Image (tube, grey):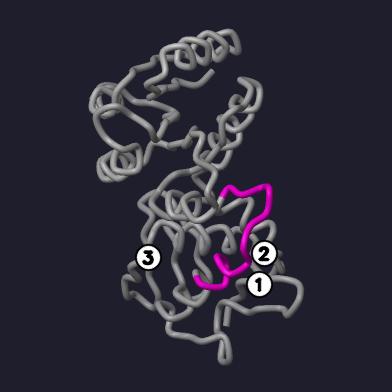
Amino acid sequence: MASVLIIEDDVRIRQTLSALLADRGHDVESVGAGMAGLEATLSRNRDVVILDLGLPDIDGAELLKMIRAVTSTPVIIATARDDEQEIVRLLDAGADDYVVKPFSARHLDARIRAVLRRGATTDDDKVIELGDLVIDTTSREVSLAGRVVSLSKKEFDLLAYLATRPGTVIGKRELLAEVWRQPYGGADKTVDVHLSWLRKKLGETAAEPRYLHTVRGVGVKLVVP
């Protein structure tokens, strides 16, 4: 069972989702406006927030930034907007997943469970050490040879995902699905651009890699230099 907060202005959708998710065993609360949703998010610990973008008092994208500024609670965007650039922008801004209306409660329930599985860690995998590279998945901090490396949310997510499987070549489709939550596919450029930014911050290049090695036509792997 998960504690779920639904921020959705459509009364019918809000009530239907609340009832169906409750039937699936979740503890559900719902609100119809953005600022009420922010207050409800902060009032108690939530396992996941379901956020609509078309809210009456504030755009959901702005609310996402406000939520992300104060909590790491997973946020699933649930909206009728299906523009790919918008999806990528919101995922980069801190959303953990994105579902496009209409969707079933079964589909949303599966996304909730997937997000919660991705967020589950054990004491053994909270800190990943690969040579001079140290990744703390709890504090979301990265250091290289003792120097703090400042990463965006998606840069960290990408590095951490690769670091959980060192030496394994991981395809771009898998990275898009697991890091950008785009199981339907997406633009390889998204991965390429973030890899380029990540390499720069780690002090390497594609031509002279240290940690991040691209295998042409296959994917990318993280190795200890």
Question: Could you tell me how far apart the alpha carbons at marks 1 and 2 are, in whole angstroms?
Answer: 8 Å
Crowd band around label 3 with a 10 angstrom C-alpha radius: few (<14), some (14–19), many (20+): some
Crowd band around label 1 with a 10 angstrom C-alpha radius: few (<14), some (14–19), many (20+): many
The magenta-colored residue range is: 181-193
| Residue placed under numbered mark 1 in the picture | 220
Q: Amino acid at mark 1?
A: Val
| Residue placed under numbered mark 2 in the picture | 172
Residue placed at 71% from the left, 64% from the top? 171
Q: Amino acid at mark 2?
A: Lys
Going from the N terminus, do you reach mark 1 or mark 3 first? 3
Q: Quadrant of the C terminus?
A: bottom right
* Nearest to viewer (mark 1 / mark 2): 2
Residue placed at 53% from the left, 70% from the top? 130
Asked whether residue 100 is drawn in magenta, I would say no
Residue 50 lies left or right of residue 99; in this view the side is: left
* Nearest to viewer (mark 3 / mark 2): 2
Residue 213 lies left or right of residue 194; in this view the side is: right
* Pointers 1 and 2 in contact (C-beta within 8 Å): yes
Q: Secondary structure at mark 1?
A: strand
Question: Could you tell me how far apart the alpha carbons at marks 3 and 2 are, in whole angstroms?
Answer: 20 Å
Q: Secondary structure at mark 2?
A: helix
Residue placed at 45% from the left, 60% from the top? 156
Res. 34 image quadrant:
top left
Q: Amino acid at mark 3?
A: Leu
**Viewer-nearest residue: 144 or 10:** 10
| Residue placed under numbered mark 3 in the picture | 151
Residue 82 lies left or right of residue 215; in this view the side is: left
Q: Secondary structure at mark 3?
A: loop
